[in-house]
Image: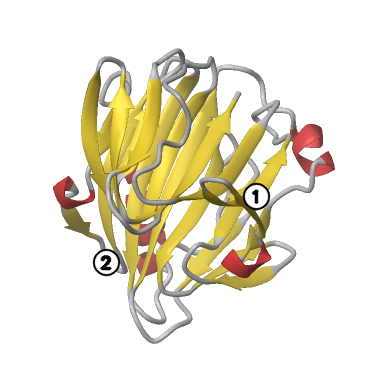
Amino acid sequence: MRPIFLTITVLTSLFAAAQQGTITSKVFGWKSFAVEKDTSFSFMKVANGATATLANLDIKVVELEPGKTPHSMLSHADAEELIVVKDGNLKVTTSSTSTIIGPGGVALIMPGDAHTFENTGKVQTIYYTLRFKTTTPINADRGKGAGGSFAGDWDQWSVQENEKGERRQVFDRFTAMFQKMELHVTSLNGGLVSHPPHKHPQEEIILVRKGTGLALIGEGTQNVAAGDLIFFSSGTLHSLKNSGTTPLEYFALQFQ
C-alpha cells in the first residue's frame, strides 16, 4: 500500500500547491512547459491560481506511459475536473463506468465522484487536466441532474459546417459548480478570424489542437500553435485568427 499512498500524496500536493497569484489573460505556450517526473507519470504545470471569477484554476499536462495510472480511485470534494486527451488512449473509470477515449476525447468529473485514469494503449498518452474551484457553493444535485460525470470520444461530437469551417459541439450544460459550462471545437479555415474582437463576462479557455494562429488579447497579439493554451479573463477584448493556410482547430471552453 505504501507506493499507492505515496503516489496519491504526491499528486494531491501538486494540485494543492501554493497559488501563483491571479491568472490573467495570456497564451501558455506548449514549448515553454517544463516536464517534471513523479513515480508513475510526468507532468507539466501550466497555471495555478485564482481568476476574476474562480477561487482557483489549476491546469496541468500529464504524460502517462502504457499500463500506468496517475493515481488509484479518489475523489475531490471541492473541485470539478475536465480532461482533454491530446495524444494516445486514456481509460476513464468512475464508480459506475469505464470508458476509453482517444485524441480529442473529453471527460468531466463532478465533485465527490471517485475516479481514476489509465493508459491502456501501447504508446504514451498525453492529456490536459483542468481543475476548477468556484467562489459559489457546490450544487451536487444540479450536476447529477444534468448528467453527472461523463467521458466521450472525438467521434461522438456532432459536426456542423459553416462559412468559416466546422464546429463540433461537445457539451453545453449545468454542472455542480457552474450554472453554464460550454465546450466546443472550432475548425477555422486559413486566413479567417473566428469572430470580431469582443468581450464577455464569462472566462474562456482555448486549447489549440492543430494549426497556427494569432490571438488578440486586449491591445496586443500573440502567436499560437498546436498544444498551446489561451486564457481569456472576464471582460478581456479578444479574438483568434488562423494565420496559416491549413485549418486552425481548437477547443473553446466557457464557464459561469
Query: Residue at horizontal 15%, vertical 46%?
Result: 32
Q: Which residue is mark 1?
A: 169
Q: How is the image coloured?
A: secondary structure
Q: Residue furthest bottom?
A: 122
Q: Which residue is mark 2?
A: 39
Question: Based on the displayed image, in which of its 4 quarters is residue 138 positioned?
Answer: top right
Question: Based on the displayed image, in which of its 4 quarters is residue 119 positioned?
Answer: bottom left
Task: Determine whether, in the image, residue 171 is placed left or right of residue 107.
Answer: right
- Circle 2/circle 1 CB separation < 8 Å: no
Q: Looking at the picture, tell me which residue is in the foreground, 216 or 22.
A: 216
Give the residue type at disc 1: Gln
Q: Is residue 183 visible?
A: yes
| Quadrant of image for the N terminus | bottom left
Circle number at residue 3:
none
Q: Position of residue 108 (x, y in %)?
A: 61, 50
Q: Secondary structure at mark 2?
A: loop
Give the residue type at disc 2: Thr
